Image (spheres, rainbow, N blue to C red):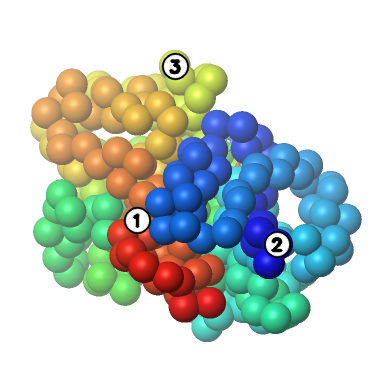
Amino acid sequence: MNSRLYCVIGYPVKHSLSPKLHNGRFKKLKIKARYFQEEVKPEKLGEFMRGFKEKYSGANVTIPHKEKVMKFLDEVAPEAKKIGAVNVIVNRDGKLVGHNTDVVGAIAALKSDVKIIKGQYAVILGAGGAARAVIYGLKNAGSHVLILNRTVENAEKLAAEFDCKFGALEDFDATNCDILINTTSVGMWPKIEETPLPNLKENLRAANKKPVVMDVIYRPKMTRMLKDAKACGCKVVIGEKMFLAQAAESFKLWVGKTPTSSGTPRR
Ligand code: ATR
């Protein structure tokens, strides 16, 4: 039997740890499969997806394709549909099915460090595909969510969909903030000195607040935003936790078993 092929589709995608992680797991579990990275420019996504079925058994989808990819799939799982974003594709006998494992990943990462209780105030930076999963998870947990984004119209649209408040990044105020999560790409390698909130330290000190601060960026592990938060005494949750949790769920969807199980795969 030929190897099954998987990939991560994104732009940029060179920073992705997914190929190394999944190839290592396939090898460990003696599964005949290989995982590649596919750098696909936004305007080329349709063309790429037309040839996908014939070549790939599944994929991860990352920045900036999580929402746009849905129109090229045969089916979208109910939760991913509600979230409005897909980060995993499964080729089920020629039928492409989209799933969202970011939501499980984000909530698992947060819960490992924080008690998420009803009525907490969460501020989400960004209004893209990753933001959708995080907001969906937090709303389900009973949090009040404020979405701040560079393009305020995008935040406004998302806020209407998920019943949240919205504003610009410059509106950030730590006074009403128990959880702060960055879902934008600002601060991602190689531009590691950037941060979506240049005045975070001053803001936290002025408000005398220490929210839990999480970044979905996992390269670098400690982003500038997380460093600033830590310097002010905040508990920080690194993006790697969410990355690993969503990757484990992706793996389960593709091969029908958890990455830590051993023995022969079911299919
Ligand atoms: P993903 O699917 O990974 O969430 P995305 O849908 O492309 O990726 O969303 C990227 C997010 O990062 C958006 O909220 C984007 O803001 P805009 O809506 O204004 O485009 C945000 N973002 C990207 N680059 C940014 C930058 N340089 N400064 C501020 N926000 C940025």
Q: Which residue is mark 1?
A: 245
Query: Would you say the beta carbon of the disc 2 residue lies within 8 angstroms of ligand 1?
Result: no
Q: Earlier in the sequence, mark 2 or mark 1?
A: 2
Name the residue located 19 percent from the left edge and 27 percent from the top edge: 230
| Residue 122 image position (x, y, % from top left) | 28, 54
| Residue 45 image position (x, y, % from top left) | 80, 53
Q: Nearer the viewer, residue 188 or 199?
A: 188
- How far is the residue under mark 3 from the one under mark 2? 44 Å
| Residue 246 image position (x, y, % from top left) | 41, 57
- Answer whether residue 241 is visible to the viewer in this image: yes
Q: Nearer the viewer, residue 207 or 47?
A: 47
Mark 3: give few (<14), some (14-19) or many (20+) Cα within 10 Å: few
Numbered disc 3: secondary structure: loop
- Which corner quadrant of the image does residue 118 belong to? bottom left
- How far is the residue under mark 2 from the one under mark 1? 28 Å
Numbered disc 1: secondary structure: helix
Name the residue located 37 percent from the left edge and 60 percent from the top edge: 259
Name the residue located 55 percent from the left edge and 32 percent from the top edge: 15
Residue type, label 1 = Ala
Mark 1: give few (<14), some (14-19) or many (20+) Cα within 10 Å: some
| Residue 238 image position (x, y, % from top left) | 30, 39
- Which corner quadrant of the image does residue 106 belong to? bottom left
- Which corner quadrant of the image does residue 47 belong to? bottom right
Q: Which residue is mark 3?
A: 193
Residue 2, numbered label: 2
Residue type, label 3 = Glu
- How far is the residue under mark 3 from the one under mark 1? 26 Å
